Image: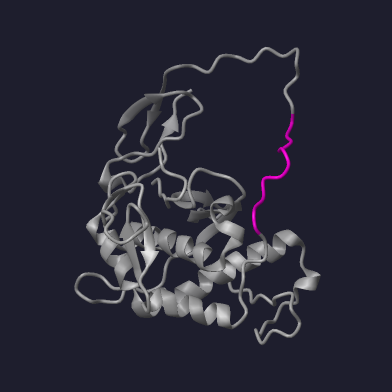
Amino acid sequence: MVAAGLRETVIGNAEILPPDADSSYDSNIDVRHLTASEELNAAVQHLFDELNRRLFIPHLKNKQGNLLGEVPECILTVQSTGRCKGFMARAQWSNHRGRYLDQITLVFEKHAHGDTRDVGQTMAHEMVHAVQLHKGKPGKGNYHNRQFSDWMKSIGLQTSQTGKPGGAEIGTGMSDYIISGGPFDRVMNDLTAEGFQIPWEAVRALPSFGIEDDPGETKPKDPSKVKFTCSVCRANAWAKQTARLVCGVPACGLPPMTANI
């Protein structure tokens, strides 16, 4: 299990105008003409784009000191609840032309009052996972290795399992904290000074509603053992039919395993 405050991995360019008309923040989009979903999604996309442009392209470096360039495009999603602050998953989306994209998800209930710096911190953490998948050597499963920790430091974030100074820098279930005066700290200071903010926060005041099952319908039992197969190395694993598995062989790149049903 991953503690609620941790950031986890398993495996465009909108400008936002804040509601305050007196703000100095420059924008090409007036949020009064956006739906709430468009407003939130545009803010999340803008955060990804600006971190890419201002933080990753000029600061993300490997051990040899070489710049690694921008983070590949990802599908960005948000959800109100979840067990961790965010996660990145490989090749979760494809289009009819056969293009595949990774996914970054932000879990908003784990960010107090939609705190923009904290959301940005989670976004940057998951962006490092995304770029490491394509340009580095990620750890097995949810293991945050030394390369990940070094890359985080290069953008001004210190890995720590406790989220505080002194915590283990590598391992599973990893959090981090901001290095004061570092690149991330400076970039977020600039963004907030320009008036950028995450416009919505998650609340849990009301129960959720969904499609109810027919009371008279008998649900079939979920098979206790279904074989899953990696599409790359053809390794097999057995789990419940509803499970979502990824191959843990590093050379495979963490592809999702397919159930044989």
Residue at 59% in and 45% down: 81
Percent coordinates x, y for residue 177 in the rendering = 38, 63
Q: In which quarter of the image is residue 41?
A: bottom right
Q: Count the marks: how many?
A: 0
Identify the main secondary structure in magenta: loop
Which portion, as a residue range, is magenta? 201-211
With respect to residue 20, does 236 lie above or below?
above
Counting from the top left corner in percent of width and height, residue 176 is at 37, 60
Q: Is 53 above or below relative to 238?
A: below
Q: Nearer the viewer, residue 123 or 20?
A: 20
Residue at the spot x=30%, y=76% of the render? 67
Looking at the image, residue 31 sits to the left or right of residue 6; the answer is right
Residue 242 appears left or right of 27: left
Which residue is more in the foreground, 112 or 230? 112
Q: Is residue 161 left or right of residue 226?
A: left
Q: Residue drawn 67% across and 50% down?
A: 203
